[in-house]
Amino acid sequence: MKGRSCKKEGIATKRHKSHIRIGALSLCICVCVFRPLLAQSRVTFTGVVQDESGAAVAGAKIALMRQISSQTLETTSGEAGRFSFEELSPGEYLLKAEASGFNPYEQILTVRPEVTEPFRINLKVGSVKTQVTVTLDDEDEVSTAQTNTTSLRFSNDLLGGLPTNSEDILPVLDRFIVPGTQGAEGTAILVDGAEGTELDIPSEAISRIRINRNPYSAAFQNPGTGRIEVSTKRGHRSYYEGSFAIHARNSLFDARNAFAKFKPDSDRRLMQAKFGGPLPGRQASFYIAAERLMDDESAVVNAVTLSGPFAANVPTSERVYRTFTRLQWWPSELHTIFGTYDFKNKSHENDKVGGFNLPEQGIHTSEYGHKFTLRDNALFTGNVRNELILSFQKERQNMGSPATAPAVIVKEAFTGGPSQSTGRETKTIFDMNDTVTRLGVTHSFIFGSRFRTARIDALDASNFGGTFEFSSLPLFAAGMPYVFRVSQGDPSVVFAVRETSGFVQDDVRVREGLNLTFGLRYSWQSITDDRNNLAPRFAFAFSPGPKRKTVLRGGAGIFYDDLPRAARRRSLLLDGIRIRHLVISNPSFPNPFLGGILTSSLPSITRVASDIRSPYLLHTTIGVEQELRDRISVSVEYTFMRGLNLFRSRDINAPLPATGMRPYPNFLNIDRIESTAFSRSNAVTISFSGRLGKFSRSYAKYVLSKSIDDTSGTFSLPADNYNLRTEAGSADFDRRHRFNFMQVLELGRGFQFGTIFSTASGAPFNITTGFDSNADTLANDRPFGVTRNTGRGPGTVQLDLRIKKVLVISHLWNDESRRGKQQVVELSLDAFNVTNHTNVTHMIGVLSSPFFGGANSADAARRFQVSLNYEFPY
């Protein structure tokens, strides 16, 4: 009975499977037969209106007239330049587009049942920006009087084809930033128009990135080469889509770091997800992206102690969690409102370890923050557009714990003992930015204003455990430090910084092929008394001849910078009242109070100079661009930059060279933050931008430059406080030759190959004796006749590759809004530093160091990463 029962069940199972096969085959036949008929009755035609630079044109009137019946349908392009016509019958149509300030557009086209990409209408621009962008994606345009081959645009598709370590794109972008154009706070990063200095959103939230867009625009504080503009993704209004991705890397396949005794352990995993689509009513959409990074690495310690060379791989751990949410609402086709919410949570174990820092120097750091942004774009009658951006941000950073014993620093040999870095900081920032644009045939006026306020609540208990400093290993062996420092008092402070700015700009179209831009910007900051920061800007583009394949372009402008908030914080904390410094010259060791010269009764303070001024950069360029063939252009550009009133620190109470006496006997050190430094830079840039159909996208940039300045930053102190002429030398970032190349190749059959290659000549480094010969309590004295940054390190070479395979998984959507949307699986293999070149990061210039003339750390050796990404419509 049991055998018969099993036999019957087996027959039933076979029949059931047979029925499933027959049903599936029938379903496939029905779909194949009837789907073309369904498609004939429902066709949706979509498109996007752009100017010659690829920028969206909102408010354009679109008309679609069927040839056989003269039936005309009309619509208006939305804020993103998009439009659509639904329920169309296949056939020939006449498409027309009109927008104020642009030439009319007409095109006969065929609407087919097959789903195609959105149709692109490229209008001839009547009112033009001086420099826009040459893109490297599907929106490329040829070089004209309105575009610029030195500008860069990274689309989401392009970024997906380039090798990036755990999708961290900032290292890639930094290769195309000009260091001399950065502000004191670092590179300006604008996310959906809200300015900051960090890019802390999931990479899946990024739609496109632009660098060097409108370098002389009065709307921005920094030049284009020191600014990164990021646009985020939004949900679609007619369908849902999502994806899951994982990126993994393990030291099993990596090469050994050049300064590690053994291959450092490494296990890095990044998980990402996104989902977006329409909200009920299809007048709004949402988009959510999240990522989780789990990074277990090893920091390489390479030092020398009394026991001899010390090399170790110290385990470190980093956890990062980021989320991004965007809600967008279209009250009308000419009005868009969207809000975003960003959240980040970071933690790092054994931070600050590596190089000369021994394992006991490791600390725990954490950071979390929230950011809300609201953006309102409205296009009014008369071609007037208003853009309002409001943002609120709150962040908290925690670093280390109170030290229980002093630290020991032996100049460029090792740093041991417990870390003296302890503190926290909470930032609350509100930012409001409003811009009005009036488009015209010969003039386009832009004006706007910005207000920003930041409240800082900080606690900095660094060096409350004290630090012994030795000039060399033999002196450490003899127990002879040259100084002991310790801080005491109240380490907390609360303060506010307010900033406001305004600008006006006129883009003038003199005639066909000649465009001028005039701009003026004003900025003010509450923590300085500088009130006359007017920054004029001018740029031009001239394209002679009927074909406009050659463009002569140039510009000049003034760019002001702000005093860093860290300078205000330090001056409030180190005022001799909140925190007092105890300084003992030539103390006993390990108990500094048994001997030595006690100078703790004299406070050491930090002040901001009463006559401090906002630094400014004089920036000018002149260049020529030539279109070699369709979508292939080359340009040559000369740039001159002159920085004035740059920030530096100087001890105005250092012992006088003649008498050894201090000018202000009631104080020890008075570190004054001044605006007395300068910089000068000359550069020639050769750029190539090219695309061969859909098979190759390439960009190359070579820079020959020379940069000189006399400061290494806001808090950098000179070797001789009374002779600043010896500080003039090569800038810290001065690399005479720099070459960057990136390319994405479509190899066919779903294969894609991406390359990033960078090489640069060596950076300069400072040469010092390691001793405090002038008794200013700093061992940064240089040998006689040696100026700042005399040394020069080796060059760098970095080759990164990505090979990607795209697998399309077909499915049977019958919904018109989902047609053409396919499930996609992407498999990627990345290789970083393929040539395994040793790119050193720290050259040793201290004569008393056993490492003098060499290096003790380098960037990572060759590494591999695998990635899997699954994208699906819903």
Image (cartoon, rainbow, N blue to C red):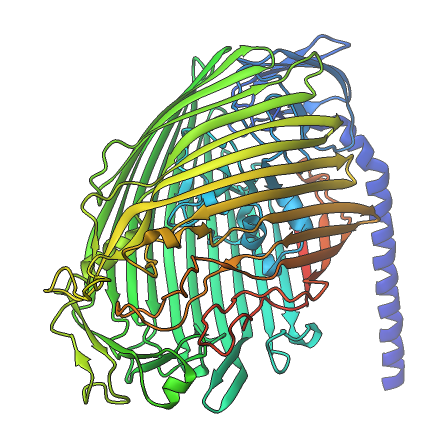
- Nearest the camera: 399 or 439? 399
- Nearest the camera: 584 or 102? 584
Residue drawn at x 20%, y 83% as measured from the top left: 596
- Nearest the camera: 782 or 578? 782
Residue drawn at x 81%, y 31% as measured from the top left: 37
Total marks shown come to 0
Res 227 seen here: no
Image quarter of residue 666 = bottom left
Residue drawn at x 21%, y 62% as measured from the top left: 658
Q: Position of residue 469 (x, y in %)?
A: 33, 78
Q: Position of residue 621 (x, y in %)?
A: 52, 30
Q: Position of residue 322 (x, y in %)?
A: 47, 58
Image quarter of residue 630 = top right
Q: Position of residue 192 (x, y in %)?
A: 46, 40
- In the image, residue 293 above or below residue 286: below
Image quarter of residue 51 = top right
Res 822 seen here: yes
